[in-house]
Amino acid sequence: MGRRKGLSFYEKEKKINKKLLKEIGQWIFWGAVMMLIAFVAVFCFGIRTSVIGGSMEPTLSNGQEILIDRFSYFFVSPGRGDVVVFLPNGNENSHYYVKRVIGLPGDAISIQDGYVMINGILYDEDGKYDKMEDGGIAETEITLGEDEYFVLGDNRNNSEDSRSSNVGIVMRNYMIGKAWFHMSSGDVHLGFIK
């Protein structure tokens, strides 16, 4: 009888070990899945940069850190009003520029009497932005081609943007992604960028 008890004890111990091994395997599997999800999230959403200058005030301030969504523009095109991050003229030696999309491919853009005109119609911005003192290259109408975007800073009279010949029209392939979340900076708190 003692031997049978001993054998059954060892048999139970083997079952426990199989169950333990299965549980460890599940932990390893789910750990790997979580690491993969974290990698994809960092790759798609994890680029972090700082805003340089006051061209996007009051939306974003100088030195404020933002997260860039590189993922969504693989599926949808940048939209009017999106805040985008790009390299001017594709210059990889430049810092990232952060501006708001105003003109989309196919639009005819001009700045008349300090206000944006899109396809001959005044672009209604609900008085959010100051009247522009200088229309730059957009004083004469510019028709955007395929994958071309016209961008402006929110601080219209203190922004180097598509009105400037050294920035000009922004090609879609110059865009790094959409600025979608900003970090705290002084009195400004965490939040999504609108």
Image (cartoon, rainbow, N blue to C red):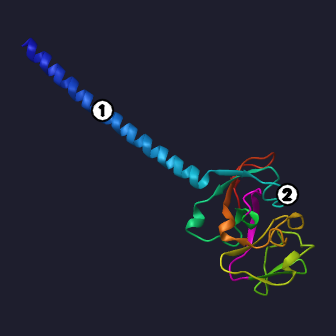
Q: Please state the horizontal and vertical placement of residue 158, each as a whole percent of the image.
A: 89, 63
**Tag 1 secondary structure:** helix
Does 44 appear above or below 186? below
- Is 156 contained in the magenta span? no
Residue at left offset 58%, top offset 70%: 76
Q: Please state the horizontal and vertical placement of residue 183, each as a whole percent of the image.
A: 72, 48
| Viewer-proximal residue among 62 and 190 | 62
| Viewer-proximal residue among 164 and 28 | 164
Side of 4 relative to 142 (left or right)? left
- Is 99 contained in the magenta span? yes
Q: Which residues are magenta?
A: 91-107
Say which mark, if any, is on residue 3: none
Q: Please state the horizontal and vertical placement of residue 147, each as a whole percent of the image.
A: 66, 75
Side of 165 relative to 79 (left or right)? right
Q: Amino acid at mark 2?
A: Gly
Q: Amino acid at mark 1?
A: Leu
Q: Please state the horizontal and vertical placement of residue 62, each as a whole percent of the image.
A: 82, 52
Residue that carries the numbered disc 1 in the rendered image: 21
The quarter in which the N terminus is drawn is top left
Mark 2 or mark 1: whose residue is earlier in sequence: 1
Side of 149 relative to 63 (left or right)? left
* Mark-to-mark CA distance, 2 and 1: 58 Å
Residue at left offset 30%, top offset 36%: 22
Residue that carries the numbered disc 2 in the rendered image: 54
Q: Quadrant of residue 94?
A: bottom right
**Tag 2 secondary structure:** loop
Q: Residue furthest bottom?
A: 120
